Structure formats: C-alpha cells, structure tokens
Image (spheres, helix red, strand yellow):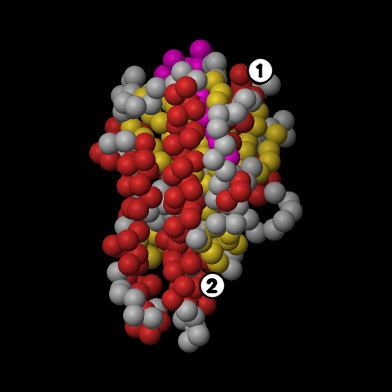
Amino acid sequence: MNGRTPGNTTFRHNNVALLGIAETTAPNPVSSESFDEHLASTLKRLHLPQGLLQRVAGVDYRRNWDNPHDFISGAVDAGKKALERAQVDADQIGVMINTSVTRETLEPSVAVSIHHGIGLPTSAMNFDIANACLGFVNGMTVVATMIDSGQIDYGLVVAGEDASRVQQATLKRLSQDDITREEYLNEFASLTLGSGAAAAVLGHADRHPEGHQVLGGVTRAGTWNHELCVGDHNGMFTDATGLLSNGMELVINAWNEAHEDGWDWNDMTMYVTHQVSKIHTNEMAKTASLDLDRMPITFPELGNVGPASLPITLARKADELESGDRILAMGVGSGLNTAMTEIVW
C-alpha cells in the first residue's frame, strides 16, 4: 500500500446539511432457501452444504421488483419521499445525481428518467455517477461541494438497483452440469445481491437548523485491485478472499490518514456501513476496532443493494437518532475504493 499522500483525499464541508433521507423497498422477498432448492443438484455434486448464504454471508432474503426496469420508478418514489421529508419543493433542486449501478442503456443516462419522473425543473442539472457501491456517498460529496461553492441551494442524490437479472443469469449458469467448485464460489457473492432504492436531499446547514450537518471525511483508492470483482447483468465474478483482505487494508489506511488529519471517529454513535455480508461487517469491525452493536445491518433481509444499501440502512435508523449523535457512513466499493463521511444529527 502507498503511504499518506498529498491532495484532496481528506475533505471538509463548511455549510451542508442532510435534510431528508428515504428508501423505497422492492415488493417481492426472495429467500436464500429458494436458491438452495434451485441449486440442489449442483450443491450435491460439488459436495457443498445448503445454507451457505445464510451461515456464511448472513443473507436470509433479498428483494426484487415486479419488473426489472422498476428500479427507475423505485428511485423516483424514493426521491419524492426524500423531498417531502426535507420539506423542499422539487423546483428548488439545483442538481440531481443518480448513483445507481443498474442501467438499461449506455445512453441516455439513468438520471434523465428519474429527473422526469420526479418532476424536477429544467434548471436542475442531472447526471449519473457510477462508482460501484460507493456511488451514493460520492454523489453526496459532489452535491455538498456544489452547495458550499454557492452554485446550488439544494441537491438530490438517488439510487435505484435491480439484481433480478444477475440472480437469474447466475442461477442458470450454476445449474450447468460442468460448473466447478471454484466457479461456484467465484459467483457466490452474486446470490447475495438485492433490489431497492434510496434518496437524500442536501441543503445549506445555516438555513436549516433542523438538518444534520455533513462535516466531510476521507476517500482513498486502491485501484490496482480493479480485477477482484467484475460484474454486469450476466453475473458478478469475485475473488472473495482478495477483495476482503485488500478492502480492509484500504479501510485502515484511509482511517489512519483521516485521524492524522484531525478526524476522530473512535467513538461514534453509529457506524453505517455498506451492506455486503456478515463476514465483511465483522471484519470491518475487527479492522477498525468498532463496536458491532453500533453497526446496524440490513443485509439479512435485503441482501447487498449496491450503492443504495448504505442510505437504506441510514433511512431505517433515522428515527432512532437524536440531536448531537455522530454518524460515520463508511464503505468499500469494487475497484477498490473506500470512503467515510461524518454526519452530525
């Protein structure tokens, strides 16, 4: 790993608040048990036990939309909910950033459909930011920077994900008679993926004392690991061991660099992480010496919903938080990249 480097890997926001955050839950639960039933002959042939998804990954269920393209209407719904909770009108939004991994076409952007569905004004800039599972956190950083610069008053970040096509392609491939044990384990992570949507509204902290100040954080790249997890609608192929060990090394480097630069995240009220699996959550807690009781999880019932996972988890815990609580949003995305952002409730 490279040592501490100059540049903007740590950053601070001056006058930005999270004003509203919301999720839209995909309607259809899909059990890990149903995957085991589908793959029973493969598991028997490869001498693999049933229940691996539950025991190893900690994923009992994930959810799917009625139709794969419903991830767009899910993001629209989440965006409208976030605006309502923030008490911000759609015509006040200066930028909307879609951070979904899922997309139907190379062009136009996913953002344009969501912009239209929410009914945002023609003056609202809109575009996609794609950075694996870190896209939503990156989108918040871009919006916060635009608010601090004075370019916009309010921004909206959205993510809507569909995992059904990856699931079906993976189940079909793993059902083949010639699939090997190594190939099965390389695609195991694909079966943890789920569908859902989330959105957040940001604005000026000094105009919204009821808001939750976004202070800033740290990012760090380990892009020499860009081949450890590669996926599309046809499947996701993962070096699970390499991804875990190199991801945790990247996390601890970023954590140490942030603390060298004046941050102190050793005693946060809550650590809201990207929801990958039980193994990743436990390893992150061990690596950064975090209290597991302060790390809420949603992967048992939702699986890994990509960039929507972290904001969904925060949205579900928002009503439990009190003024002054300190939240650290943190995660690792394929590539590898990591990001951590502090929010004061």
Is residue 136 shown to the viewer in this render? no
Tell me what residue is drawn at x 68 percent, y 38 percent.
126
Q: Position of residue 182 (x, y in %)?
A: 46, 73
Q: Position of residue 30 (x, y in %)?
A: 38, 65
Q: Is residue 209 magenta?
A: yes
Residue 277 position in % (x across, y down): 37, 53
| Residue 151 visible here | yes
The answer to whether residue 265 is above or below residue 161 is above
Residue bearing the label numbered 1? 150
Q: Residue at x 44, y 50 (%)?
A: 245
Q: Earlier in the sequence, mark 2 or mark 1?
A: 1
| Labels in figure, total | 2
**Span colored in magenta:** 205-221
Residue at horizontal 35 percent and vertical 59 percent from the top: 57
Q: Name the spot of residue 285 as percent of width and height, x first.
A: 33, 41
Q: Nearer the viewer, mark 2 or mark 1?
A: 2
Q: Is residue 86 above or below residue 285?
A: above
Residue at 46% x, 42% y is 249
Task: Give the structural element (helix, strand or loop) at label 1.
Answer: loop
Tell me the amino acid under the disc marked 1.
Gly
- Labels 2 & 1 near each other (Cβ < 8 A): no
Dot 2: within a 10 Å radius of its alpha carbon, few (fewer than 14), some, or many (20 or more) residues? some
Q: Is residue 156 within the magenta segment? A: no
Q: Residues within 10 Å of mark 1 (few under 14, many from 20)?
A: few
Q: CA distance from mark 2 to mark 1?
A: 46 Å
Q: Residue 233: which disc?
A: none
Residue 214 higher or lower than 293, as above or below: above
Q: Which residue type carries mark 2? A: Ala
Disc 2 is placed on an element classified as: helix
Rendered image quadrant of residue 49: bottom left
Task: Look at mark 2 in the image and give the residue it sits on.
Answer: 169
Name the residue at the top extreme. 206
